[in-house]
Image (cartoon, coloured by chain):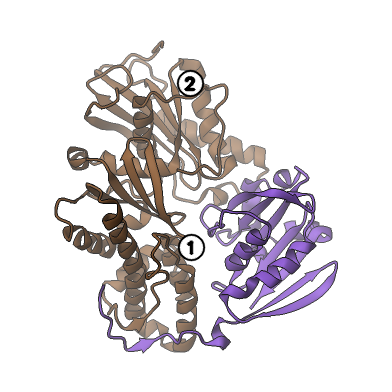
Chain colours: A purple, B brown
Amino acid sequence: MRMQRTAYRVPRNSVKRDGRKAEIRSKEGSRAFVVPEVMAWSGVAEYVSELLRPGTVLAISGELGAGKTTFIQALTKTLGIKKVPPSPTFSLMRSYRLPKTFNGIRRIIHVDAYRFDDERELVVLDLDEELADGSSVLVIEWPEKMPKWLKKKKADLVQMEIA
Amino acid sequence: MAVISKHKSAGFKVLGIETSCDETSVALLEVRGTTQPPARGTRYAVQLLHHETATQIPIHRRYGGVVPEVAARTHIAEVIKLLERADIFASEKQGFDAIAVTQGPGLATALRVGIEAARTLAYLTDVPIVGVNHLEGHLASAWLVPENREHWRFPVLVLLVSGGHSELVLMKDFCSYKVVGRTRDDASGEAFDKTAKLMGLSYPGGPILSRYAAKGNPEAYGLPRPMIHDPSLDMSFSGLKTAVRNLIHDLGPKVPEVLPDLCASIQAAIVDVLVNKTSRAIMAYKPKCLAVVGGVSANPHLQAELRKAASEHPGLIMLEPPKGFYTDNAAMIAAAGAWRLAQGKKDDWKKIDAKPELDL
């Protein structure tokens, strides 16, 4: 292992830097959380999981590195899914089965629109077809890339912003 | 098995088709010395007779603005065009004896295009068809290099690193794999691309970052090596992304002038993690050969550091990175198809379907 002489060291464990604010808006109203560090997402995940029903579209916004995928990992863990979802940036879409049906939900579809330049590109994902099974929830990272499609889903939308 | 196509050379030809995500690719691989499916345990010479990959534009960008059915038809037309250029339909010229098609993992709609073309051909020609795991294809890309086939001894430890995957796979035999480590979040290729984006570099960020890194000081910035002390062989790169984000915020307008040092430090952090985990895997599993495959395997710093790590284990042979086959392609699918056929595996054209969540 190499020894490092560093001219600059990125400050570690700086609460101000590691901490995040999460705001969730749904039919139940608006709720904000302060998340002090990476391990503390489970409380938010539990709150969000109760908002999910078949057909729900959970749209998660946040900059690169804000914690979107990390939150989703906490969410799938809360739902009992054993597989830890890696980032779907390159694959665009992945899906995970719940071991036990929860609120009528049997599957989480995890989409990452980061690589889209134009909303029409999401045609290749066939999202309406995917949701038509009546027991799936769609979680989207970078929802800003697909505003028109999300407008149609207003009734089923739960919005989350991580900063 | 009726072979409708007549061929001049005495070899078993595998037609490979790859459409799992961004690339559309077709290849014809000849296994020399046999006109029957390759047999288990026999060493063969192989030759790539044809290999073509369609435009590098990501699949979701190619057909934007059209309805799914039209997009699918356009994609199939593209596959057919590639097949025509491989002279597949001119039976006096080449022909093929088996078809290997990517079954997964990937995007269901994209996978189906290749699978539908493959099934139709299998039905028309009555040749065996075999579904291939895309990741297995990457493992087979190393086998396409002739020198590697000379040195090939099991167990082979493979570091598979691309935009979408970062895994350490132990190959105990052809078609016998154990994933011994993988990324918990971002793939290493993704780490390159996203940190490049944070620095304002254009697409494709990874290779551009690497070029700047060659001119910079890798120790200029102390970036974290996530999970490097974790005893498991798993990896993580999202913490590095966050650290880079914070660092760029701190540097503010200075970023352009320190770009080479920044890039060098980021590259060093990613490579350190990959090499560290690979070294641990070598000590744990004592493979006879080490291979690195996937888009990120083209990175010269990664290649150099892996060679150094491999040289610390006398008797371990480091196989050559598969130049020309780093990114997704059909040649590796044809090769993996040959492996499967040699193990007696084959599929039913009536039943074969996409498996978007397929794992090794």
Residue shown at the point (50%, 62%) measured from the top left:
B185
- The residue lying toward the viewer, choosing from A147 and B128, is B128
Q: Between B310 and B259, which is closer to the camera in this rendering? A: B310
At horizontal 30% and vertical 23% (from top left) the residue drawn is B38
Instruction: Label 1, secondary structure: give it.
Output: loop
**Image quadrant where one finds the N terminus of chain B:** top left
Question: As shown in the figure, which amino acid type bears the numbered disc 1?
Answer: Asp
The label shown at residue B267 is none
Q: Quadrant of residue B229?
A: bottom left
How many numbered discs, if any?
Answer: 2
* Three-letter code, disc 2: Ala
Q: Is residue B170 above or below residue B122?
A: below
The image shows residue A78 at horizontal and vertical percentages of 67, 61
Position above or below: B318 against B250:
above
Please tell me which of labels 2 and 1 falls first in the chain. Answer: 2
Q: Are marks 2 and 1 in contact (CB under 8 Å)?
A: no
According to the picture, the residue beneath numbered tag 2 turns out to be: B122
Q: Residues within 10 Å of mark 1 (few under 14, many from 20)?
A: many
- Residue lying at 64% horizontally and 52% vertically, measured from the top left: A122
Camera sees residue B359: yes
- Left or right for B344, reference B44: right
Nearer to the camera, B91 or B217:
B217
Which circle, 2 or 1, is nearer the viewer?
1
Q: Chain of mark 2?
A: B
Query: Residue B94's spot in the image, x, y percent?
Result: 33, 21
Which chain does the numbered disc 1 sit on?
B
Up the image or down, B45 lies above or below A61; here it is above
Q: CA distance from mark 2 to mark 1?
A: 38 Å
Element type at mark 2 = helix
Numbered circle sitting on residue B186: 1
Residue B295, position as x, y percentages in the image: 37, 54
